């Protein structure tokens, strides 16, 4: 009897093991070939559910899904390096506003809402996330643009007569791109609507203005250049081979560049710049620093040669600041000659002797009193070329 009972128990165990093996084989056939750690560790399963897009819940049917069912990417958050890489990959994701989250929650099916407070990783992408381009901080080196000082020799402000070349990248065609600036600085550009005033503006400023005025294109790309310069001119004359008006391509240009266009003659030595409201500027062309003097539109430049050397002189000595041979001109008086020689010294008296050579070659002398001349008691004598002036010492 005991043998029968034991045999029955053995048979029952065998049948049970056979049935269990069949069930496991069926489950294995329905599971993916790669077994994840979430099937073995409940804590890992909780972390794996975090990877599912918000708005879905992990259910038991997921485990019974077929091999063709898409699965969420596996990320083992027990490995801190993997988690850090995941957070870095999602750094560009931007969480929606509270109103967007509420809207998503209200439109999700019942029971599909995921409580973000239980997720534990704020870097994960919520449902309907959007990405945006990250803007560098205001103090970033890419956004810092130090102002660059521009001088008059580096800019050009257009004026009447200038011909502009206006290129529009959005509208390539065979039509002419050249437009002349009219009187009063007006520009007629069809795509800009009404006429616009561009006089006194740079090409960069004109391009920015046209981008605002052109409405048929969205964010039009406009490029403006000066094709022909006409509004800035100076006049050059004198010792040059090509006198006349010369055009400036900047607001101001060095004198030597304009004289190069006028072809200065070899005997030229000086240039006189006449400018409205300013005293005439005399430039020594032999001095390189003076030749770099800036000229502006409207200047009149006269180039002159070397002044002729004087051929007539008078001579001065005695108690005088600068004695020696001095240039003589007709009508020169005694006091003028003394002042032209630097004036008298402190030890000088009031007596001045003037000697003059006669026709026979002999000198005749005459004395004058400077104090009486200066007070108007006696006339100031007119000198002749070759006169000798000697300022006497005081007694």
Image (tube, grey):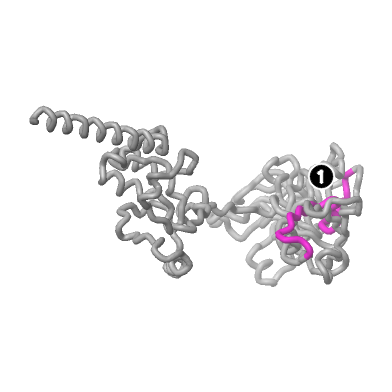
Q: At which x and y percent is residue 333?
A: 75, 59
Q: Which residues are magenta?
A: 216-240
Q: At which x and y percent is residue 343?
A: 62, 56
Asked whether 294 or 375 is in front, the reply is 294
- Residue drawn at (11%, 27%) of the image: 3
Asked whether 346 or 92 is in front, the reply is 92
**Residue at the spot of label 1:** 259
Q: Is residue 332 left or right of residue 148?
A: right
Would you say residue 139 sits in the magenta stretch?
no
The answer to whether residue 247 shows anywhere in this view is no
Q: At which x and y percent is residue 119?
A: 32, 55
Would you say residue 223 sits in the magenta stretch?
yes
Asked whether 177 or 361 is in front, the reply is 177
Residue found at the very far left of the displayed protein: 2
Q: Is residue 185 left or right of residue 34?
A: right
Q: At which x and y percent is residue 19?
A: 30, 35
* Up/down of 160 relative to 26, above or below: below
Label 1 element class: helix
Q: Is residue 50 left or right of residue 217?
A: left
């Amino acid at each position: 009897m005991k043998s029968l009972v034991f045999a029955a128990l053995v048979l029952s165990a065998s049948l049970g093991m056979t049935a269990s093996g069949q069930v496991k084989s069926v489950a294995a056939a329905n599971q993916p070939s790669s077994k994840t750690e979430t099937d073995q560790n409940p804590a890992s399963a909780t972390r794996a559910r975090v990877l599912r897009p918000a708005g879905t819940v992990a259910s038991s049917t997921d485990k019974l899904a077929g091999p063709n069912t898409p699965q969420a990417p596996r990320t083992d958050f027990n490995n801190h390096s993997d988690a850090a890489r995941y957070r870095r990959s999602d750094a560009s994701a931007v969480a929606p506003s509270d109103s967007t989250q509420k809207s998503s929650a209200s439109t999700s099916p019942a029971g599909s809402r995921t409580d973000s407070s239980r997720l534990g990783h704020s870097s994960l992408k919520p449902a309907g996330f959007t990405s945006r381009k990250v803007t560098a901080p205001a103090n970033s080196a890419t956004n810092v643009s130090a102002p660059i000082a521009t001088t008059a020799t580096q800019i050009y402000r257009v004026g009447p007569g200038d011909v502009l070349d206006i290129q529009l990248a959005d509208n390539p065609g065979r039509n002419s791109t050249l437009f002349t600036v009219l009187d009063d600085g007006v520009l007629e550009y069809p795509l800009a609507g009404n006429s616009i005033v561009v006089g006194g503006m740079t090409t960069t400023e004109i391009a920015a203005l046209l981008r605002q005025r052109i409405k048929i294109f969205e964010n039009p790309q406009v490029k403006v250049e000066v094709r022909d310069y006409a509004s800035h001119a100076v006049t050059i004359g004198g010792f040059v081979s090509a006198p006349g008006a010369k055009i400036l391509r900047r607001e101001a240009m060095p004198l030597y560049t304009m004289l190069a266009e006028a072809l200065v003659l070899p005997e030229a030595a000086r240039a006189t710049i006449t400018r409205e409201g300013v005293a005439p500027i005399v430039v020594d062309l032999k001095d390189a620093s003076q030749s770099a003097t800036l000229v502006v539109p409207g200047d009149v430049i006269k180039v002159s040669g070397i002044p002729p050397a004087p051929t007539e002189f008078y001579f001065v000595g005695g108690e005088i600041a600068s004695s020696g041979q001095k240039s003589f001109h007709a009508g020169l008086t005694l006091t003028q000659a003394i002042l032209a020689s630097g004036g008298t010294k402190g030890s000088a008296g009031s007596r001045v002797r003037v000697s003059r050579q006669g026709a026979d070659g002999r000198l005749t002398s005459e004395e004058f009193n400077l104090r009486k001349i200066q007070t108007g008691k006696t006339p100031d004598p007119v000198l002749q070329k070759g006169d000798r002036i000697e300022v006497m010492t005081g007694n």
